[in-house]
Image (cartoon, rainbow, N blue to C red):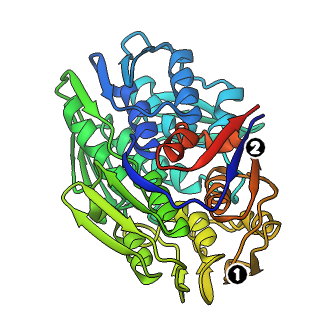
Amino acid sequence: MSRIVVTGGLPLCGELNAPGAKNAALPILAACLLAHHPVRLLGCPKLTDVANMVELLRTLGCSVNWDGDVLNIDSRSAQCHEMPEHLSKALRSSIFLLGPMIGKFKRAVANFPGGCDIGVRPIDLHIAALNALGVSIEESHGSIICEGSNLKGAAIHLDYPSVGATENAIMAAVAAKGETTIQNAAREPEVVHLQEFLCKLGYTVNGAGSSTIYIKGGCTPKTAEHRIMADRIVAGTYLCAAAITAGDITMRGIVPEQLGSIVGKLKECGCEVITESELIRVKGPKRPRELKRVETMPYPGFPTDMQAQIFALCTIADGTSMIVENVFENRFRHASELARMGAESCINGRIAVIRGVKTLTGTRVDAKDLRGGAALVLAGLRAEGETEVCGAEHISRGYEAIETALSSLGAKIRREP
């Protein structure tokens, strides 16, 4: 267990380079199982979730080695088709390995995945997509047992544009016989990024970024070197730090269009925003304006992974804001912790109404999940006095040394055991 201690009241100013994206790295690491030659992944973030995925690949028989921020992966010796329970339960994204394992071994055994407690997050869409590809799936004593010897292309229609189900279906379909079409596919940039990687490996995938994706089974093996895309959620979090502290922060190495919904809300609350080809600069107002309505949706809508951070911003806004959480039913757990700092909000199911206060007060709070923990750190940057955010290991799942990044911008922040 560790905690992050923040002394608030300082405007943050400076520049940061966006790190590699966790949500892009994890499915690509899983897809390395499908590579016929060694792979080099550049710009991999050193996060708890990435470390767990690396360990999962090793237990399956892959050779995985770090060289700075580069991961070298060789899956040619992988033979095991069973994921160990302790690792799959520690990592929600362990589910990404189902598609590649079925593609490589024609069978897979996994446990129901773990991760942050932000809602039920059923995997029925994953199972339905794999079923459509001819995979036989049994659930027994908490395990998912998949048999895919008859893997074949199919027409798949997702009831909801789930990122994970879309990516899993793509990774299984590239190893299937024939052609596959995925309709109502997720359009997130991370899905496009996975397509780019699979094409580098020699597979044929087209249409990512739209609602229909086309896959032709089979591979012309190639060696691959691939750089992990920038993390739009981490970038958005640090830009929120500019808004909440009346600071001036520039994020470099990102695609501004990928943060369109986030930038729109920062402008709405009174921030001055400057965008260039790979840069976003945000100058925060003395006090943000209220946000009449923030509604989380699949991309290109406002991301659920930024909901907690924008909630923290609304706690000190001038007026009353409303947030509607459409993706996960249990993602307002940060509200009770922010209340301990003086925030005023009312939660009714998936709707939060937040009345902004002029001042937050530093105190001891608990990070109950990844993004909620980041939101508490943001609130601590604005609060009077010292804020102790306990459970900092949750934050380390998605932010590499958040205290170092914020310190470089002028924050008074430290991590303690």
Residue 40, percent across and down? Answer: 30, 22
Circle 1 crowding by C-alpha within 10 Å: few under 14, some 14–19, many from 20: some
Instruction: Tell me the quarter of the image containing the C terminus.
Output: top right
Q: Position of residue 382 (x, y in %)?
A: 63, 64
On the image, the x and y values in percent for residue 185 come to: 37, 61
Quarter of image, res 19: top left
Residue 203 vertical placement versus 67 (above, below): below
Tell me the SS state at disc 1: loop
Rendered residue at 83%/66% (across/down):
340
As shown in the figure, which amino acid type bears the numbered disc 1? Val
Residue 196's image quarter?
top left
Q: In this view, does 381 lie to the left or right of 67?
A: right
First along the sequence among labels 2 and 1: 1
Q: What residue type is labelled 2?
A: Gly
Quadrant of the snapshot with the N terminus: top right
Can residue 140 be seen at all in this image of the molecule?
yes
Q: Which of 99 and 179 is in front in this view?
A: 99
- Percent position of residue 113, x then y: 65, 41
Q: In this view, does 55 lie to the left or right of 151?
A: right
Residue located 51% across and 49% down the image: 410
> In the rendered view, does 135 fall on the left or right side of 379?
left
Give me the disc on residue 391. 2
124 vs 346, nearest the viewer: 346
Q: Which circle marks residue 357 in the picture? A: 1
CA–CA distance in space, label 2 to label 1: 26 Å
In the rendered image, is residue 209 in sight? no
Report the side of 393 relative to 268 (left or right).
right
